Amino acid sequence: MAVNLSKNGTELMAAYKEVVDGKSDTNWVLFTYEGNSNDIRLAEKGDGGLEEMVEELSSGKVMYAFCRVQDPNSGLPKYVLINWTGEGVKDSRKGMCANHVSSMANFLKGAHVTVNARAEDDVEPDAILEKVSKASGASFHFHKQTPEYRDAPRGPVGSVYQKINAVEEIQQTNKDDFWSQAQRDEEVRRREESKRAEEERRAVERERREMDERQAKERERRAKERAQQIEEESLKELISNCYSLICFKNEAEDNYTGSSGQDIRARALYDYQAADDTEITFDPGDIITGIDMLDEGWWRGTGPDGHFGMFPANYVELL
């Protein structure tokens, strides 16, 4: 998405004009984004020069600084544009903001030197002033030409001759070369950033797929173990139930044999309410007679009300 310079346009332009206005004490201004949006806002401004401005740069932000400095050669004011991308900025954000550099350069016109910086070493005031000095070096040496050259005789000038300002020509050549190199460097940087972002995206995607595969295999392994465990427990329970039933039948047969010709009775230990007509109802202490031991869990007998039906065996004790 394109950078938005219109939302806070009045404030941005006013701050920029303070720097380019030679009568103003303000000699630097710093811009950044509003949160994660593409809206540019004023971050700070001051009159303490590069040293003061550098202190306001944040390693977690993308920022743009425009500064007025004094040319070490000529003493004239020069303007420096700093495109700052902190080392803590996410690669995805770096890639997006890299497309805004040219728009910011068009807005902050008049820069003699542009610095693309990521760390404090890139914005050392002395290093920036050295770049300013080199950018104006040709112009400076031109004014130091020898008297012999100035006094040398000149030939006649033709009618189509146009006077050439050598200083302007050299400055323009240096400026064109500088901006061409800066644009090439910026393009290379953008490609590298895009490549790194794509590699990181692929690495994250690959790691996510591998994690999903590991988790799926782990779930499958646990499911198999659980199924096997359930099967083993069910088999053990079945064997146990069969053994208990055999023992119960043997015991019931023994009781029946020992009580031959006698009525099997039991006393209720708990109260029980019949669920339907096939069951009997009784209270604690009631006597159930004529008991028929069907299986381990359920017996049949005559309740205190004379009704014959089934009841849970563990609710009574034999007499």
Image (cartoon, rainbow, N blue to C red):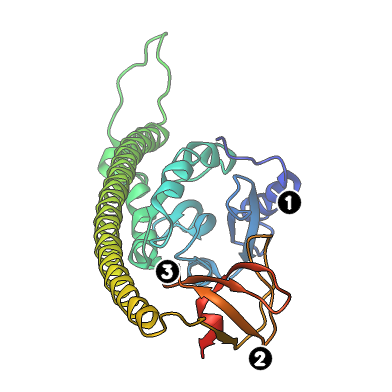
Mark 3 neighbour class, 10 Å CA radius: few under 14, some 14 to 19, many 20 or more: some
In the picture shown, does residue 164 fall above or below 156?
Answer: below
Mark 1 neighbour class, 10 Å CA radius: few under 14, some 14 to 19, many 20 or more: few
Which one is in front, 44 or 169? 44
Mark 2 neighbour class, 10 Å CA radius: few under 14, some 14 to 19, many 20 or more: few
Q: Distance between the Cα atoms at labels 2 and 3?
A: 23 Å
- Give x and y (percent) for residue 162: 43, 17
Residues at circles 1 and 2 in contact by the CB criterion of under 8 Å: no
Q: Where residue 11 is drawn, which disc sits there?
A: 1
Q: Where residue 285 is drawn, which disc sits there?
A: 2
- Give x and y (percent) for residue 169: 38, 31
| Left or right of residue 100, residue 239 in this image | left
Figure quadrant of the N terminus? top right
> Does residue 140 show up?
no
In the picture shown, does residue 231 fall above or below 134?
Answer: below
Instruction: Give the residue type that dot 1 points to.
Output: Glu
Q: Distance between the Cα atoms at labels 1 and 3?
A: 94 Å
